[in-house]
Image (cartoon, grey):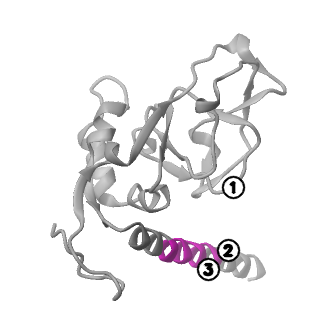
């Protein structure tokens, strides 16, 4: 892959840099809890089942009666990533937390990536290139990707924050349009 993209917004030029993901932020491991910690109301624990159709879903929630440090609480623009699961196809599934959630953290089979370029990185985490790396690095005995390997995944990034933001904004608009078309198609199917 070249470090100068073929398609580009005209106001940007120059080479992109190939860097590991770990240079752009940090990973925050998920919370381990026991069945005794599960309560009716408490701290929401986000799991892979809370990511549905690239959106946050509150259909299958788990709450715990544990206190966690602020660093482990979910923040807007965190990227929630499934790193362990019984199903191999769910490893790497991710979601950019784009709105305020109830007070929450994430479970042990998840990790959070927290950095300044998350809006851009969240789109990269949906590419075939990313999933190819995930599947090359899956654990032998359990479907998992460890954090030290995840931080080493390399890709090309624009040097300028402005270009990252413009690309992320454009791709988010495309995702929104696709989502609208899917909903329209579903409504037309119902109408039919």
Specify the quadrant that holds the N terminus: bottom left
Residue located 48% across and 55% down the image: 118
Q: Is 129 above or below relative to 38?
A: below
The residue at which mark 3 appears reads as: 181
Residue 167 sits in quarter: bottom left
Q: Crowding near pointer 1: few (<14 within 10 Å), some, many (20+)?
A: few
Residue 183 is marked as 2
Crowding at mark 2 (Cα within 10 Å: few <14, some 14-19, many 20+): few
151 lies above or below 37: below
Query: Contact (CB < 8 A) between labels 2 and 1?
Result: no
Identify residue for label 1: 99
Q: Was residue 177 drawn as part of the magenta stretch in this picture?
A: yes
Q: Residue at x 33, y 51 (%)?
A: 131
Q: In this picture, which residue range is highlighted in magenta? A: 169-180
Crowding at dot 3, Cα within 10 Å, few <14 / some 14-19 / many 20+, comes out as few
Which numbered tag is attached to residue 153? none
Q: Residue furthest bottom?
A: 10
Element class at badge 3: helix
* In the displayed structure image, the side of residue 21 where residue 170 appears, left or right: right
* Lower sequence index among marks 2 and 1: 1
Of 21 and 46, which appears nearest the observer? Answer: 21
Magenta segment, prevailing SS (helix, strand or loop):
helix
Circle 3/circle 2 CB separation < 8 Å: yes
Relative side of 59 to 48, left or right: right
């Amino acid at each position: 892959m070249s470090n100068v993209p073929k398609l580009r917004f005209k106001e940007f030029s120059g080479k992109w840099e190939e860097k590991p993901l770990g240079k752009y932020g940090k990973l925050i491991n998920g919370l381990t809890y026991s069945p005794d910690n599960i309560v009716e109301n408490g701290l929401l624990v986000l799991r892979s089942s809370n990511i549905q159709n690239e959106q946050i879903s509150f259909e299958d929630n788990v709450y715990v009666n544990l206190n966690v440090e602020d660093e482990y609480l979910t923040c807007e623009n965190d990227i929630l990533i499934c790193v362990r699961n019984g199903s191999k196809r769910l490893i790497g599934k991710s979601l950019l937390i784009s709105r305020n959630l109830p007070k929450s953290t994430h479970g042990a089979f998840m990790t959070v990536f927290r950095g300044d370029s998350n809006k851009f990185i969240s789109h990269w985490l949906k590419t075939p290139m990313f999933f190819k790396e995930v599947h090359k690095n899956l654990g032998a005995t359990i479907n998992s990707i460890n954090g030290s390997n995840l931080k080493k995944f390399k890709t090309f990034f624009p040097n300028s924050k402005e270009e990252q933001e413009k690309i992320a904004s454009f791709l988010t608009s495309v995702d929104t349009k696709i989502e609208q078309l899917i909903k329209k198609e579903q409504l037309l199917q119902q109408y039919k």
